[in-house]
Image (cartoon, rainbow, N blue to C red):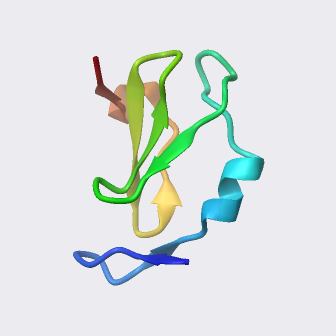
Amino acid sequence: MTATPSEGTTFDPRMLESLVCPVTHAVLTFDRDRQELVSKAAHLAFPIRGGIPVMLVSEARKID
């Protein structure tokens, strides 16, 4: 498990085995430093808050 320094909670990277991008259904990668799940196919980064991925497109950050 990975500790989130600012929130004191954890995200279990094994969750990536069952999570996919809600837009493209592609595989996600975990950005440990930013505490985000990244969809390279959709060019979106989904935040992890309180150890829980927020898989809403409206909450995602656009990436290059």
Task: Give whichever of 37, 59 is nearer the camera.
Answer: 37
Image quadrant where one finds the C terminus: top left
Residue furthest to the right: 18
Which residue is located at x 68 percent, y 58 percent? 15
Which residue is located at x 58 percent, y 17 percent? 23
Residue furthest to the bottom: 8
Residue 9 in the image, given as x and y percentages of width and height: 42, 79
Residue 32 in the image, given as x and y percentages of width and height: 39, 59
Residue 52 in the image, given as x and y percentages of width and height: 51, 61
Residue 14 in the image, given as x and y percentages of width and height: 70, 62
Q: Quadrant of residue 20?
A: top right
Residue 8 position (above or below residue 33)? below
24 horizontally vs 45: left or right? right
10 horizontally vs 47: left or right? right
Image quadrant where one finds the N terminus: bottom right
Which residue is located at x 77 percent, y 47 percent? 18
Q: In the rendered picture of this protein, how many numbered marks are placed on residues?
A: 0
Which residue is located at x 58 percent, y 37 percent? 28
18 horizontally vs 39: left or right? right
Residue 21 position (above or below residue 6)? above
